Amino acid sequence: MKKSNFISYKFSQISEEESIQNSEEFYRLMKTRRTVRTFSKKKANDEIIKNCIKTAASAPSGANQQPWHFVVVTDPSIRKKIRDAAEKEEIEFYSGRAPEEWLNALKKFETNEVKPFLEEASHLIIVFQKSYDIDSDGNKLKIYYSKESVGISVGMLLTAIHNAGLVSLTHTPSPMNFLNTILNRPENEKPFLIIAAGYPADDTKVPDIKKKSFEEITTFV
Ligand SMILES: Cc1cc2nc3c(=O)[nH]c(=O)nc-3n(C[C@H](O)[C@H](O)[C@H](O)COP(=O)(O)O)c2cc1C
C-alpha cells in the first residue's frame, strides 16, 4: 500500500468570542502600521529581524516552491554601494525616466532621489524572487505563481516587523538589477523589493493619507 504523505493538522480551537476579540485586536495593531522614511541609527536586535524573516518564510507559496531569498545587509560598505547605485537610478527616474503621471502620484510623499535610509535604517532586507529553480542535475525547474507567493511573504514580513515594534519602508528603485551584482545573487533571482527596517527617527512625520473605506473595497455576495 502506498504510504500517505499526510500528517494530522493540529488545530487549536478557540471560542467564537475570543476569535472576534483576536481579530479586532489584530486589526487595531495593524492599522497603526505606517511606512516610515526617516530612521534612527539605533540598531535593532538581529534576533527580531531573524524571527520576522522566519515568519515571512512560513508563508504559503505556489506548490510550496518558496521562491524567495532574503539578504540582510548591515555592513556599512555594502550599504553605501547600494545607496550609491540606487540614487544613480533614482536621479534618472526623477529627472526624466518617470512619466509625468507617476511623478504626480508621488508628489504627496515628497520623495526624491536622496535615499539616506539606505545607510541609516538598522537593517536592509533585500527580497529576491526566484523566476526559476535549478535541480541537482542543473535542469531549470518552472516556478508557479512566483510573484504572488513572494508578495504574500513580504506582506507577512511587514506585518511581523510591525508586530515586533519596529518600522519599515518598502523601497523599489527602478530598475534594481544592481542588487544582483552587489550582493552576488544568481541569475534566477530577481530583486523584488528593498525593505528598510529599524526604529524611526525622533521627529518622524508621515504623509496624511487615507485608506479606502471597507464598503468601497469589499463586496459580500
Ligand atoms: C510595492 C511597493 C513599492 C513601494 N515603493 C516605495 C518607494 O520606492 N519609495 C517610498 O518612499 N515608498 C514606497 N512604497 C511605500 C508606499 O508609498 C506606501 O506603502 C503607501 O503610500 C501607503 O502608506 P502606508 O504604508 O504608510 O500605509 C512602496 C510600497 C509598495 C507596496
Image (cartoon, rainbow, N blue to C red):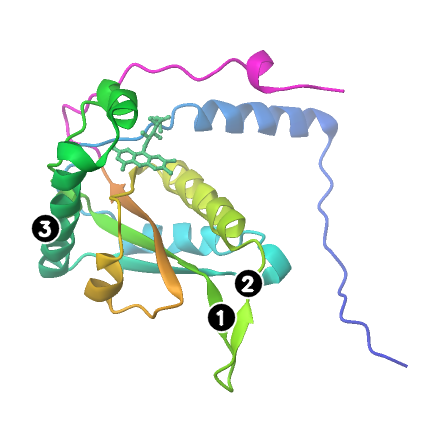
Picture coordinates of residue 156 (x, y %)? 47, 44
Image point 14% across, 54% down: which residue?
A: 79
SS state under label 1: strand
Mark 2 touching mark 1, by CB under 8 A?
yes
Residue corresponding to mark 1: 133
Image point 14% across, 52% down: which residue?
A: 85
Amino acid type, callout 3:
Asp
Image point 48% across, 66% down: which residue?
A: 132
Residue corresponding to mark 2: 143
- State left or right for residue 213 relative to residue 159: right
- Assign the N terminus to one quadrant of the image: bottom right
Q: Is residue 205 magenta?
A: yes
Q: Tell me if residue 145 comes above or below residue 104 in the rendering.
A: below
- State left or right for residue 93 relative to residue 160: left
Amino acid type, callout 1:
Asp
Dividing the picture into quadrants, the one containing residue 161 is top left
- Give the mark nearest the N terminus, 3 or 1: 3
Q: Tell me if residue 205 comes above or below residue 5 in the rendering.
A: above
Residue corresponding to mark 3: 84
Q: Which span of residues is magenta-colored?
A: 200-221
Q: Is residue 144 magenta?
A: no
Residue 160 visible in the shown view: yes
Picture coordinates of residue 30 (x, y %)? 45, 28
Q: Residues within 10 Å of mark 2 (few under 14, many from 20)?
A: some
